[in-house]
Amino acid sequence: MRIDSSIYKEPKLWEAKGWHVPAFDLLAVRKKTRENPVWVHFGGGNIFRALIGRAASGLLERGLMDRGLIVTESYDATLIDEIYIKHDLLSLAVMVDGSGTIEKSVVSSIGEALHAAGAWPEDMKRLKTIFSAPSLQMVSFTITEKGYTIADSSGEVLLPIRKDIENGPNKAASILGIVSALLLERYNRGRWPIALVSMDNCSSNGALLWRGIHMIAKGWEEQGWAPKGFCGYVDDPDQVAFPWTMIDKITPRPSQKVTELLEADDIEDLVTVDTKKHTFASAFVNSEAFECLVIEDRFPGGRPPLEQAGFIMTDRDHVERSERMKVCTCLNPLHTMLAVFGCLLGKKTIAEAVADPVLGELTKHLGYDEGLPVVTDPEVISPRAFLDDVIENRLPNPFILDTPERIVTDTSMKISVRFGQTIKAWQERNMDTGRLKVIPLVLAGWLRYLTGTNDCGEPVKLSPDPRLSQLCPVVEAAAKAIVKETATTEVPNSSKMAENNTGTQGMKAAGEVLEPLLRDESIWGCDLYRAGLVPEILRYFGSMLAGPGAVYKTLKSVLEQEAEKLQ
Ligand SMILES: NC(=O)c1ccc[n+]([C@@H]2O[C@H](COP(=O)([O-])OP(=O)(O)OC[C@H]3O[C@@H](n4cnc5c(N)ncnc54)[C@H](O)[C@@H]3O)[C@@H](O)[C@H]2O)c1
Ligand SMILES: O=P(O)(O)OC[C@@H](O)[C@@H](O)[C@H](O)[C@H](O)CO
């Protein structure tokens, strides 16, 4: 059985093997999608098909939508060619819950797949036509945190963005430049309203997307590339809205076990590509069954009936609270902790990491004792019930073969959101940040990870991260200063630390080397010195460098100290 349009010619063959083939007239939907496009998506990675594409297939099947999605890539061309076009725009979605129940369905909502880049002039022309259509209501994005970056740590606007502003819309190359150029086309053709909907794990994701598009629109207007009024269009929420969202569904890279499951169904051509841009993709996606998408209901040009897909449509305040609850406290920080220590301790999956008694307990401390106390109730979701579910069911799900390596990817882009916001919330509420133990432990653990050796002292392959070349030499120099002197595996308790907070010479030298980094708010989301966390971070970092097994020993001793406090 092949993953292509033959599925719709012989759906019974698939249904006999337990596959759900959404029942609608595929060709008619595709024709309508092309004639009167309604929804474009940027970023055709795994979450797009697992959550958005699957939900849209359901809406089409139920007759609640009559047009599908147009997927487009400005970054990773291979996805368009190898994942979408090669498979006639069809994909498979496999979801497994904690009991091992498997749900298999065909994702058939994609009506067109286009390259959004100058090297594909025909596709760009087509995209301009699509953006000129009054019928177009929304453009959504899952392009990772990196996709929204406009400046470096010193606030200097990045070269690709500067070049896009200088060279104008026809030569735009960054995703923000390309979207701005398409929006300019829409403005020139009719100024139709539209919603640009970021669905990435960034705090205030809508504001982040607006910030990038606004900067380029303003630059083009100033340089004469765009008519006066274009920036006003982008800035007018009744014309161009940037709804905020919170998105949740653990969607790992394609797993070997699922490949084998599909092979057992006689499905062919199940290769997983690791593209030049490091996207791991296959014609199938695998994920947990749980999903949640909270969306600010601001769509000036109308929208598909998203609530019918189970999405929560609400106001910005409730989205923001939901997003902070999930991304800053109750899920993603736990993920990053398990990923960092999972890599250091050689855990193959997140489920294996959280099953470790020490990591499991630390996960609970991080969630219940350090995150939950600063959550503002989102009301549309119960934070306590959400966290319970994450800890009891979702992270331990043994069927989700999610790897620490995936989650640790781009940590420098995520850490400010996943930890910085919580540290700031403790400060803003005048809570004693000295009580934070697991957060500084994770930050120190990440530095330890960046030294490039695991807890057995073997080299560890670092996952891609745009700041590795900046960070690794600094961390290495600090580690050298500590290791030169004999590091100790014993983590002194807080009272000992208070007596001796200057530490050893090696620690002092390491502190000096790391100081600019630890003050860099663009990484941590706050100044770790002002937050009072640096002594703790340095102590843990030093302790984790004391030879093989030191990372695990450090984790255990922190846990023991926390347990002692509770007695
Ligand atoms: N996978 C999940 O569990 C999950 C869950 C919730 C939210 N998300 C959000 O979705 C994002 C993507 O996840 P995924 O599973 O699709 O990852 P993926 O690795 O499968 O795909 C990444 C996508 O982002 C695009 N991209 C990467 N860097 C870019 C850049 N600089 N400019 C433009 N596009 C860029 C790629 O082309 C690709 O389409 C995550 O970073 C996260 O913000 C993912
Ligand atoms: O997708 P990222 O790279 O932002 O983060 C990795 C994971 O933590 C993330 O994908 C989670 O699986 C997801 O946020 C769960 O909803």
Image: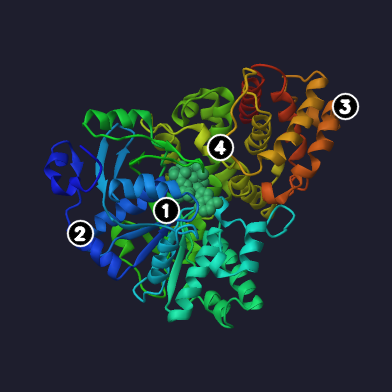
The label shown at residue 27 is: 2
State the separation of the CA atoms marked 4 and 2.
41 Å
Compared with residue 492, is residue 419 higher up or lower down, i.e. above or below?
below
Q: Amino acid at mark 2?
A: Leu
Q: Mark 2 or mark 3: which comes first in sequence?
A: 2
Q: Secondary structure at mark 1?
A: loop
Q: Is residue 531 left or right of residue 339?
A: right
Q: Quadrant of the C terminus?
A: top right
State the separation of the CA atoms marked 4 and 1.
27 Å
Q: Mark 4 or mark 3: which comes first in sequence?
A: 4
Q: Amino acid at mark 1?
A: Ile
Q: Is residue 69 left or right of residue 280?
A: left
The verdict on label 1 being within 8 Å of ligand 2 is no
- Label 1, on which residue? 381
State the separation of the CA atoms marked 1 and 3.
49 Å
Residue in the foreground of this view, choosing between 4 and 516 = 4
Q: Mark 4 or mark 2: which comes first in sequence?
A: 2
* Residue 516 figure quarter: top right
Residue 231 visible here: yes
Q: Amino acid at mark 4?
A: Val
The verdict on label 2 being within 8 Å of ligand 1 is no
Q: Secondary structure at mark 4?
A: helix
The label shown at residue 505 is: 3
Residue 368 visible here: no
Q: Secondary structure at mark 2?
A: helix
